[in-house]
Image (cartoon, grey):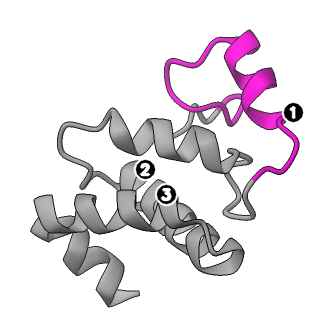
Amino acid sequence: MTDQADNRPNGASNEQTVRHVAQPNASADGNGMTPEALKTALRGAASPTDDQQVQHARALFQHALDQRDADAAQLIARAMDAHPALDAALNAA
């Protein structure tokens, strides 16, 4: 979810937003996050089923396919196994 006023992720500082947007090799999911940032976000999710985490998982899943990133594919597979709702969300798209 984002702040309507400035389109930053809720709770993000200006510095976090600049780092987030200015990353080279950013994913094409509209978030501007690098694959490494997506991996970190997904690893830190206790229950990755809210909308933002599903978007991160979709972006990382696409990256894993496009770039043949085994680490990303393994992370997504583990998250899908651990969280049936995430599995269902990713299979619905």
Tell me the CA gap for discs 2 and 3: 21 Å
In the rendered image, which residue does mark 2 sit on?
52
Question: At which x and y percent is residue 31?
Answer: 67, 50
Rendered position, 50 above or below 43: below
Which residue range is magenta in the image? 5-26
- SS under mark 1: loop
Residue occupying the point 49% across, 55% down? 56
Q: From this view, report whether residue 87 is shown above or below residue 37.
A: below
> Which amino acid does the dot numbered 3 rest on?
Asp
Residue to which mark 3 is pinned: 71
Q: Residues within 10 Å of mark 3 (few under 14, many from 20)?
A: few
Picture quadrant of residue 90:
bottom left
Residue 88 is tagged as none
Label 1 neighbour load within 10 Å: few <14, some 14-19, many 20+: few
Q: Name which quarter of the figure residue 24 lies in.
A: top right
Tell me the mark number nearer the camera, choosing from 2 and 3.
3
Picture residue at 59% right of the left edge, 80% below the top: 65
Q: Secondary structure beneath disc 3?
A: helix
Towards the viewer: 19 or 5 = 19
In reply to whether residue 14 is colored magenta, the answer given is yes
Apparent side of residue 74 relative to residue 37 in the rendered image (left or right): left
Q: Nearer the viewer, residue 83 or 4?
A: 83
Q: Residue 43, image x and y in percent?
A: 35, 39
Mark sitting earlier along the chain (2/1): 1
The C terminus is located in which quarter?
A: bottom left
